[in-house]
Image: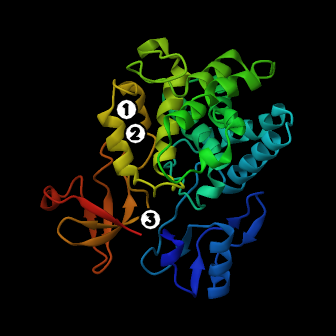
Amino acid sequence: MRFLSIDSVAAGSKLGKPLYSEQGIVLLRENAELTENILSRLKTMGFTGLYIEDDISEGIIIQDIVDERLRMEAASRLENIVNSNGNIEEMAPLISDIVDNIIHNKDVEVNMKHMWGHHEYTYLHCVNVGILAVCVGIKLNFSRDELLCLGAAGILHDIGKKFIPIEILDKQGKLTDEEFDIIKNHPELGYGILASAIELSSITKVGILEHHERYDGSGYPRGLRGDEITVFGRILAVADTYDAMTSDRAYRNAFSPSETVEYLMGNGNKLYDSAIIDTFIRCVTIYPVGTCVELSDGTQGIIIKNYSDCVLRPVIRNLTTKKLVDLKNDKDYYNICISKLIV
């Protein structure tokens, strides 16, 4: 199984994983044949990528750290609550299920491919940030109760954006200073919405308030620096930045995971806590299993295994010869690196 941009999926391909609607309802089942009409319809619905089964990816199994149906259902429920001023307590069972999924699958690679375009971005982004934050919390040996609080903070971190005009959120050009000032209000607006929610812990609410604080004091709303920012705020800052940068937006295409991790590492103890970044990098995969890549010597291959202690040097299966290339341990490849993704 491998992930492809929907524009690269050929008619007649077999679907590798079930497809779900925004409400978590099955649209297509595994192994469904993708006809021209189906692909056209999926593009219209906003899908930007799909998992497929083919000869190149034979034998590769990709597991989800959180069930895709649950992820979509959580995003849909959050959207409904925000748009109808519903009871935030309705998210509690879903957050609990997400945390339990991650605890159960803690050794599974975090590989949340973005299958939807930017129009479906906001609520899936919130769920993704919650998932990424909980993964970090597990590495930091948080208790289950702490993970529930952290997951809630991640999933609810952008709830204040409901008060930001959509024309600002989806603006394709650069924001004016006035527009950016409006955007910068959303952590306080979100905190204000949730301040009276007795079902949420104070550390959850403060994490939401602080997710745009930066380690050097350049963030907002309070300009906190270093350990003045709670550990929830520092975790959310990294998780939020990673998912935002690796997603297509109205005004730019997504950055690759490797580019995004380089950005985070380059801003360690400047914008972000280096210790949190180090932990985060042990949670995510730079080159997820099933990703096709080209090496610096021109070899093309597909990722079949990653090393958590050497994230840039995975094991690759040559697309032509089927030979395995271990970039970490094979001395013949010590001077070879991954040069680009093939999507």
Task: Identify the secondary structure beneath mark 1.
Answer: helix
Query: Residue drawn at (56%, 37%), measured in percent from left and top?
Result: 179
Task: Identify the secondary structure beneath mark 3.
Answer: loop
How far apart marks 2 and 1 lie (CA) works out to 5 Å
Q: Are marks 2 and 1 in contact (CB under 8 Å)?
A: yes
Q: Which residue is mark 1?
A: 278
**Mark toward the start of the polypeptide (2 vs 3):** 2
Residue 313, compared with residue 107, is above or below; it is: below
Query: In the rendering, at what x and y percent does residue 32 appear?
Result: 66, 80
**Is residue 35 in view from this perspective?**
no
Query: In the rendering, at what x and y percent does residue 38 appear?
Result: 67, 81
Query: Residue drawn at (60%, 32%), measured in percent from left and top?
Result: 182
* Amino acid type, callout 2: Ile
Q: Which residue is mark 3?
A: 290
Q: Which residue is mark 2?
A: 281
* Amino acid type, callout 3: Gly
Q: Locate residue 250: give its quadrant.
A: bottom right
* Amino acid type, callout 1: Asp
Work out which quarter of the rendered image holds the C terminus and state it: bottom left
Task: Identify the secondary structure beneath mark 2.
Answer: helix
**Mark toward the start of the polypeptide (3 vs 1):** 1
Q: Are marks 2 and 3 in contact (CB under 8 Å)?
A: no
